[in-house]
Structure formats: structure tokens, C-alpha cells
Image (spheres, grey):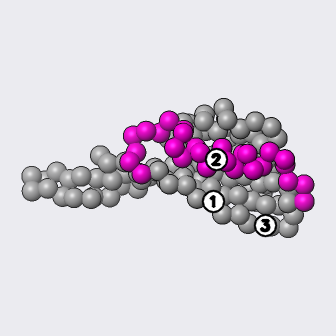
């Protein structure tokens, strides 16, 4: 899931905002996405499996949820001109990224302002039945 989402974002993001192949981690207590602003960092998926319906023969229908967090930090005073188009690309990623084995694709993001940095945290959730 991570690679499909990352591949889509890499091919679609142009201009000042680009992607990083690295995982989002902290270095010296400072998140890498804050150090390298205008880079999109995609985390590893958090996978949750739950039983939807148990059957009499001991089998069950399961739902698998893959949740990925994606991070982007930009200078709040000097926002990139391409920020709005990058946000649109990231919104479209939920349906256009080639992740087609899921029946429910969801996307949301929150913005926090820390000093002079806007931090966007995107959450993608892909749910499939197994």
C-alpha cells in the first residue's frame, strides 16, 4: 500500500512540493518532515484485521484496514504557490493511486501551526474484505 501511494504521489506532485522515499522519523528530536519542508513523507501502514461475520463451519469474513499517515510541512509565511494543487493531488490519491483491492477508501487531513510552520498530517484508510 505504501509503495502504491508513494508512486502515485511521486508521479503527480510537481513544482516546489515533492516526495521523499524515506520514512517519516525523528532525528535529534525533530521530525524529518519539519527539517525538510516541502517534502511529502509516507509512513508504513498500520494494519488492523477484524471479524465481520463468523460462519457455522468455523470460517469467518474479515475486514482488513490499512491506515497510512502522510506528512507535509511548509513555511506558514511563505507558502509555496503549488500548495493548493499539491493538496488536490493528495486528495485524489485516495481513488487514483491504484489501490483497487479495497471496498472503502477514505482520506482526511488536519493542519497544525507550530511557530512559523504549517504541518499537514494526512490519513488514508483503505479497507478490504478477506
Disc 1 secondary structure class: strand
Task: Give residue 26's quadrant in the image.
Answer: bottom right
User: Looking at the image, which residue is at 60% across and 36% down?
Assistant: 8
From mark 1 to mark 3, how far is it between C-alphas? Answer: 13 Å
- Dot 2 or dot 3: first in sequence order is 2
Name of the residue lying farthest toward the right: 77
Q: Nearer the viewer, residue 9 or 66?
A: 9
Give neighbour class at mark 3: few <14, some 14-19, many 20+ (Cα, 10 Å): few
**Mark 1, residue position:** 109
Front: mark 1 or 3: 1
Asked which quadrant contains residue 48, the reply is bottom left
Q: In the rendering, which numbered label is found on residue 113?
A: 3
Mark linked to residue 90: 2
Q: Report how many numbered discs are placed on residues in the image.
A: 3
Q: Mark 1 near mark 2, Cβ–Cβ under 8 Å?
A: yes
Judging depth in this view, the residue of 48 and 113 nearest the camera is 113
Mark closer to the chain start, 1 or 2: 2
* Visible residue check, residue 24: no
Which range is magenta? 77-104
Residue at position x 51%, y 49% in the image: 45
Amino acid at each position: 500500500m505504501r509503495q502504491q501511494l508513494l508512486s502515485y504521489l511521486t508521479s503527480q506532485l510537481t513544482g516546489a512540493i515533492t516526495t521523499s522515499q524515506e520514512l517519516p522519523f525523528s532525528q535529534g528530536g525533530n521530525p524529518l518532515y519539519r527539517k525538510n519542508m516541502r517534502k511529502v513523507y509516507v509512513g508504513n501502514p498500520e494494519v488492523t484485521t477484524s471479524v465481520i461475520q463468523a460462519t457455522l463451519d468455523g470460517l469467518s469474513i474479515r475486514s482488513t484496514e490499512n491506515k497510512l499517515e502522510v506528512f507535509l510541512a511548509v513555511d506558514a509565511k511563505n507558502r509555496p504557490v503549488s500548495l493548493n494543487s499539491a493538496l488536490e493531488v493528495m486528495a485524489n490519491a485516495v481513488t487514483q493511486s491504484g489501490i483497487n483491492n479495497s471496498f472503502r477508501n477514505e482520506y482526511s487531513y488536519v493542519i497544525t501551526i507550530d511557530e512559523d510552520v504549517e504541518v499537514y498530517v494526512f490519513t488514508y484508510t483503505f479497507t478490504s474484505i478477506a
